[in-house]
Image: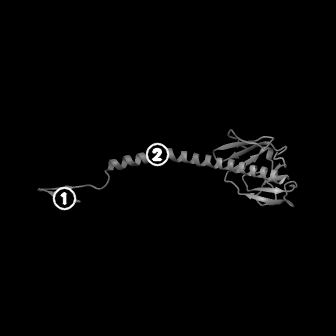
Amino acid sequence: MHRREGSQLHFSRAGFTLIELLVTLAVLTIMLTWGVPNFQRLMEQLSIDTGISRLQRAIALTRNTAISQQRRLTLCPSANNKQCSPNWDLPLLILVGNVDGDALEGAEVLKVIAGGDLERVNFRNGYRWLRIGSSGWPRGYNGTFTLCGQKASATLVMSATGRLRVGPPGDCSS
């Protein structure tokens, strides 16, 4: 765009100089270099927190249902609704009736809780199910859930009375 003042033409510029563009690119590069790994860590921690919340809700629902219906229930991870699995990140089934070994034949499924998106979630000694009696206590099933993501981990500790607390990061090396 130009305008005439007296005998001189004045031009106004619309755009960036090379120096402004290089400074902007340098700042953007620094921000991305710092920001992307932090964002990835944030997403990993969010995934771990979601896994903890999912297990807490599933166990609380199983406990409350066992108490209100006055019967023993089983919480079991299963990929195919036919047998229990040691990976507690799979869909969780709340069942009425006994789990025969790992088979779920004859057990009535009360509720299915969607699976998570972690690498692996283990429960003490590879337990494949959790039985909760009509008192709400998981007799003999206290222990630690270890939640493993790609770079982060956590533990969820269950007491003998079925109370849950979040523990320190877990060992996911195995």
In contact (CB < 8 Å): disc 2 and disc 1: no
Which residue is rendered at x = 64% and y = 44% of the image? 152
Name, please, the residue furthest toward the front: 68
Name, please, the residue furthest toward the top: 168
Residue depth check, mark 2 versus mark 1: number of the one nearer the observer: 1
Task: Tell me, for residue 3, which label it has, or none.
Answer: 1
In the picture, which quadrant includes the C terminus? top right
Q: Secondary structure at mark 1?
A: strand
Q: Secondary structure at mark 2?
A: helix
Q: Is residue 129 visible?
A: no
Task: Tell me, for residue 70, which label it has, or none.
Answer: none
Q: Is residue 158 visible?
A: yes
Question: Residue 15 appears in which quarter of the rendering?
Answer: bottom left
Q: Amino acid at mark 1?
A: Arg
Q: CA distance from mark 2 to mark 1?
A: 40 Å
Residue 4 % position (x, y): 16, 58
For the residue pair 69 and 122, the one nearer the viewer reads as: 69
Q: According to the image, label 2 marks what residue?
A: 31
Residue 55 % position (x, y): 72, 49
The first of marks 2 and 1 along the sequence is 1
Which residue is rendered at x = 70% and y = 46% of the image? 147
